[in-house]
Amino acid sequence: MPKAESLPNITADDVAAQAGVSRWTVNRAFKKDASISPKTREKVMTAAQSLGYVPDLSAAALASTRSNLVALLIDDFANPHKLVMLEKLTRALRSRGWDTLLVNTLDSDDAAPALLNASQRRVDATILIGIQFDDEVLNAAHDARRFKKLIIFARTSENPNTISIAVDDEAATREIAQYVIRKGYQRPLYMAGPRTVSAHLLRKETFAREWKDRFDREPECIAADRYDPDLAASIAHDALKDRTAAELPDIIVCENDALALGVIDTIRHRLGLRVPQDIAVLGFDDVPQAAGHNYRLTTYRQPLTEMSNYLVDVLESQDDTVHDRKFLGRLVPRDSA
Amino acid sequence: MPKAESLPNITADDVAAQAGVSRWTVNRAFKKDASISPKTREKVMTAAQSLGYVPDLSAAALASTRSNLVALLIDDFANPHKLVMLEKLTRALRSRGWDTLLVNTLDSDDAAPALLNASQRRVDATILIGIQFDDEVLNAAHDARRFKKLIIFARTSENPNTISIAVDDEAATREIAQYVIRKGYQRPLYMAGPRTVSAHLLRKETFAREWKDRFDREPECIAADRYDPDLAASIAHDALKDRTAAELPDIIVCENDALALGVIDTIRHRLGLRVPQDIAVLGFDDVPQAAGHNYRLTTYRQPLTEMSNYLVDVLESQDDTVHDRKFLGRLVPRDSA
DNA sequence: AAAAATGTTGCACGCGCGTGCAAACGATGT
DNA sequence: ACATCGTTTGCACGCGCGTGCAACATTTTT
């Protein structure tokens, strides 16, 4: 039976009275690099402890220009990789003193309202890890000036108003293409994801270019407009069900693991074929299931921990230099290709 | 190149000046059931729009006793069901005007600090969807009085200081047990999850009781201390690898899908057996992958949308009556059992 | 021992909005 | 036209803490 009774909050004033110092000294005691003598700090901390006082970050945010709060906007919950990203991001953020406001972008028209919603809480930065943020929305957000930093995480963006922290898609895809070529695959099928953000065709285009450079022909391509295993399964099925063995690809290169997992399921359970003997599959992200005994998916691992830590570095930096950065991951060969 | 320049914020005062009314009228215009005439409201809204004004929720939280913010504490990111829960919860919350502070409980000792962290943002409620919250932590949090409402979501809790919104574990497990019995399985193996919270042995105990009532013997049990498919896979493998066919269970009933998926992988790929012909598997939660062609997992679906909406009802209710509520889900029979 | 340098503490003001009440307004009835 | 009632608007005060500077205490230097 939780009570809603509003007993008076304990404020810094209460602690100040008990410790025999001024309120400002109390707040100093809680500030990392404040100028305060060790003994008064300890005196204050003891008093605070006995009263159960903790600084009110909400009031702190109002009084200063910093809130130590970031908004995290996300929309595609079907992609299991998102859970990993949420874990890595919130871990890096919280362990360095940042709180996270999670905003679910409810549908395709909700991007702008979601962005606005975040701004109403005085966030210091807005992190986008969804797919529905196009240039129009981004620019509008930037023009409104309500956003100190707009960070696109794990996705390349060429929008000059944003900071993009992602793997180097070109380098990664080149590595993947080289791997496919080296392993002697002849008839690749590339499965792309949603193309909401222009720059995200990068992977598909890079793969196509590499392939063409080598064999002087375009690889076949199909696309799913969501990173959803079930959707990928259906699309792959539609594309392949009526083909003869000779018409089938020998490898399906997927823009990410969410697609690859669905594709593997379709190959095995709807087409009745084997992976990788009949059709090999290659992914991107290295989701937890990729390593499991069922999929053993060959994929490309992003350095998410490193990327998350860099993101916090960006948050804590003051200067206005562009903070875009591309990371290198690594190909993880398993059994699927 | 996002600028950090702090141009003056647009406040209600600015809008008031432009609309020719007082600041208070401006804020009234943005409040749902405020006493304000339609025409002044429109006048204010027009002015607000032209200036790009939106109320500052951070200041509103400070001034009033409500923040329209809830903290969501989570720790077990290995369980894919958590992503579904995050989606349903944030959707219900945001579509009804609530913001979500996502707090990653970093490790087992971090539960109390995480709770404290949330309280510093003046949240109106704290929702627990992790596993590391034992009675000690819960009671300490409640005693500190910093939490208006402590809600345990999708997990039964008998702690009187919390509000538990969950499926009726007993009814659900009874239904599962009856299904297993009806289908003629003889040698079930029950795989339990972590037992951090006392009440969560409910499923295992209920299953054991039902089985004993029918056959007068205890079913065999094993346990994983995290809801992690990989861990479940290892534990199942260790438990079964040296058995003869006659010693193997004919069905493995798992406390949830996270375990069930790992168990299926082990049965197929490490033991070389078939599901369900050699060993059947039953889960709980109905994660997205359970429906896919690979697993076709028979499982029990929780009414998460309904539960999420009820949670918001609880947030919006004023009275102090206990709001615990148990929901009924339904068994979804597929091919795995 | 005095002066200068350094370290430490106190304070006025404001961040943007909510609360509760009082004043002003408009409509209704006699 | 006047009193009455309900509706709409305005306002003083406070929520808890940061900022920047001034005052004070302590240490170091000469």
Image (cartoon, coloured by chain):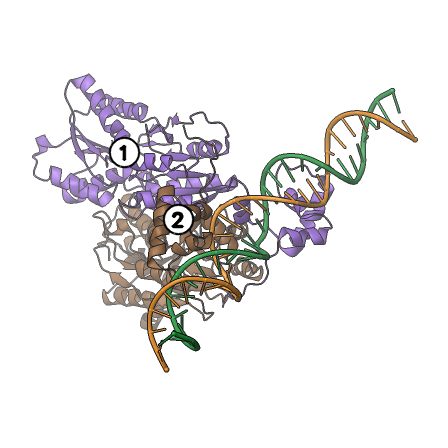
Chain colours: A brown, B purple, C green, D orange
- Can residue B45 be seen by looking at this rendering? yes
At mark 1, the secondary structure is: loop
Query: Horizontal placement of A275 versus A43: left or right?
Result: left
Say which quadrant the N terminus of chain A sits in.
Answer: top left
Q: Position of residue B289 (x, y in %)?
A: 32, 42
Q: Which mark is residue B93?
A: none
Give yes or no for contact between labels 1 and 2 (Cβ–Cβ under 8 Å): no
Dot 1 alpha-carbon crowd within 10 angstroms: few under 14, some 14 to 19, many 20 or more? some
The answer for how far apart the CA atoms under marks 1 and 2 are is: 39 Å
- Can residue B286 be seen by looking at this rendering? no
Query: Horizontal placement of B260 versus A86: left or right?
Result: left
Q: Residue at x 30, y 56 (%)?
A: A283
Near-viewer residue (A130 or B273): A130
At mark 2, the secondary structure is: helix
Residue corresponding to mark 2: A19
Residue corresponding to mark 1: B197
Q: Amino acid at mark 2?
A: Ala
The chain that hosts pointer 1 is B
Q: Position of residue B281 (x, y in %)?
A: 23, 34
Relative to residue A213, is residue B276 depicted above or below?
A: above
Relative to residue A220, is residue B22 depicted above or below?
A: above
Relative to residue A25, is residue B292 depicted above or below?
A: above
Label total for image: 2
